[in-house]
Image (cartoon, rainbow, N blue to C red):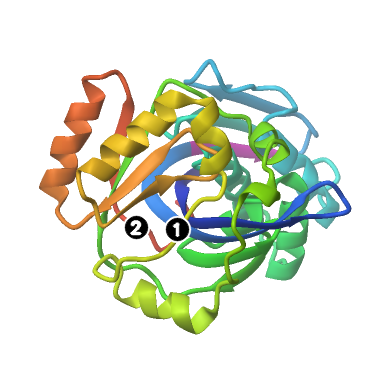
Amino acid sequence: MRVTTRAKVNLHLDIVRKRNDGFHEIETIFQSVSLADTLYIDFHDDACVTITCNDPAIPVDGSNLCAQAVCAMRSFGLPRLGATIRIDKRIPVGAGLGGGSANAAGVMLAVCRARYREIPIAELEAVAAEIGSDVPFMLHGGTMLGRGRGEILTRLEPIRRGVFLIVKPDVSVSTAWAYGNFNSRLTKHRPRITLNAVNSVLARFPAALPSFRNALEDVVCPAHPTIAHVLDDLLREMPCFASMSGSGSALFAVLADRRWAETLAERFSVRGFFTSVVEPAKRAVDIE
């Protein structure tokens, strides 16, 4: 079974408060993009999970989110579910692009397809949230508002235009570190998103310049000057919009013209940065 699992960017990410369970209440706008990993999966019934990956930075033991997804799906009447998974990795790790979360969602949906299980989406989302906060979104993809830890989802007006240039410096940022060092007292309170307002912007995106932001830039950029410099370099090119994705270290710029995006990608690439020019995507996972 061949599974395509796509990256995401956060068009907007605001932190509302710290919760009693230690997590943060957030408000974010997820957007799937065409940068993707490919999973090759064979399922079997020996309760064994074997993972290989072309990227040596990716763990292939039980900490891999694909392995966790296989184990989690056993709760749906598949006690001995096992899998052999090969990951062809293109989404960079430690980038805030949700590659691992997309992989996990891809495995979950592949189990449903391979084992002919019609599991209610609410039940899948609940299991996905135990694996990671971004995994429920990856079961859907497209353009969605995420609240709670990001797992409370609302479908938004899909983005139909614009080209995304993704740039990742040779730096990785721990999500736990970024949220752990966020100080809400240093950030001016902003009003919560209203669906009518955000859908109006997204319907005209990127022509309608959004007032989106990523609150974690206030933490990550001072601690990682390279990330701050790349963001400044992107903004100097006057894109429709530019921001950091998730907790970083990847940044993205939205441009109207693909050729200009490819020209900028080459400029950043020769400086040793990962670059990718991608389109908005309607889904996070496709299964063949």
Seen at 58% across and 71% down, the residue is 191
Pointer 1: what residue? 31
Q: Report if the CB atoms under discs 1 and 2 are less than 8 Å apart.
A: yes
Seen at 62% across and 45% down, the residue is 107
What amino acid does circle 2 point to?
Pro
Frontmost residue, 287 versus 131: 131
Q: Is residue 96 positioned above or below 285 on the image?
A: above
What amino acid does circle 1 point to?
Gln
Query: In x, y percent, where is residue 90?
Result: 41, 32
Seen at 62% across and 62% down, the residue is 189
- Describe residue 9's horizontal placement relative to residue 278 as left or right: right
- The numbered mark, 1 or 2, whose residue comes first in the sequence reads 1
Tell me if I can see residue 169 in this picture.
yes
Query: In x, y percent, where is residue 5?
Result: 48, 46
Give the alpha-carbon distance from disc 1 to disc 2, as whole Å. Answer: 7 Å
- Describe residue 194's horizontal placement relative to residue 148 as left or right: left
When asked about the image quadrant of residue 271, the answer is: top left
Frontmost residue, 162 versus 78: 162
Q: Element at badge 2? A: loop
Query: In x, y percent, where is residue 280?
Result: 34, 57
Stretch in magenta:
39-44
When asked about the image quadrant of residue 83, the answer is: top right
How many neighbours does mark 1 have within 10 angstroms: few (below 14), some (14-19), or many (20 or more)? many
Residue projecting furthest to the right: 20
Pointer 2: what residue? 280
Query: In x, y percent, where is residue 53?
Result: 53, 23
Q: Is residue 224 positioned above or below 262 on the image?
A: above
Q: Element at badge 1? A: strand
